[in-house]
Image (cartoon, rainbow, N blue to C red):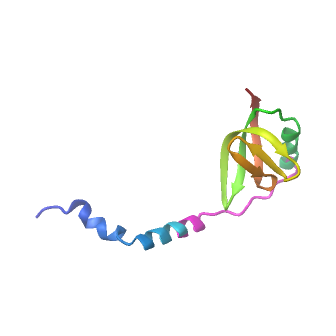
């Protein structure tokens, strides 16, 4: 008898609709609620944002659609009217910001 190899598992990936549905279910199941910030964390974020310089690179932690992400970004400017940070990778609303660390100027 010969081994069927990958042909043996082909039927399990044949339903594309089922695959996308299972991926969506896994994505929804892994979401976490947005953490509450303490007053110390809010003060730390406020201090960093008050003392920032254009072109400053920071390590940020932010919440987006049920997931927490970390990234090193450059702060272009702070938009107080729209309550968001303008970064080299896009915009980030203040309410989604969780932490700022290791800021330095290049």
Q: Residue sitting at 89 percent across and 39 percent down?
A: 50
Asked whether 90 falls inside the magenta stretch, the response is no
Query: Hey, which residue is sitting farthest top in the picture?
Result: 106
Q: Could you say where residue 15 lies in the image, as x and y percent from the top left?
A: 38, 72
Asked whether 35 falls inside the magenta stretch, the response is yes
Give the side of residue 8 with respect to residue 72, left or right.
left
Q: What stretch is highlighted in magenta?
A: 25-40
**Quadrant (top left/top right/bottom left/bottom right) for the C terminus:** top right
Q: Could you say where residue 91 lies in the image, as x and y percent from the top left?
A: 74, 49
Give the side of residue 18 with respect to residue 102, left or right.
left
Give the side of residue 66 with respect to residue 56, left or right.
left
Q: In this view, does 93 lie above or below 20?
A: above
Q: Could you say where residue 101 lies in the image, as x and y percent from the top left?
A: 75, 39
Q: Residue sitting at 84 percent across and 39 percent down?
A: 48
**Quadrant (top left/top right/bottom left/bottom right) for the N terminus:** bottom left
Q: Residue sitting at 87 percent across and 35 percent down?
A: 51
């Amino acid at each position: 008898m010969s081994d069927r190899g990958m042909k043996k598992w082909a039927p399990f990936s044949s339903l594309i609709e089922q695959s996308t549905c299972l991926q969506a279910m896994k994505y929804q199941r892994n979401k976490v609620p947005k953490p509450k910030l303490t007053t110390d964390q809010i003060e730390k974020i406020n201090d960093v944002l008050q003392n920032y310089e254009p072109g400053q690179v920071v390590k940020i932690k932010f919440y987006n659609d049920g997931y927490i992400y970390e990234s090193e970004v450059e702060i272009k400017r702070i938009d107080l009217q729209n309550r968001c940070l303008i970064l080299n990778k896009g915009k980030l609303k203040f309410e989604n910001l969780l932490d700022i660390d290791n800021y330095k100027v290049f």
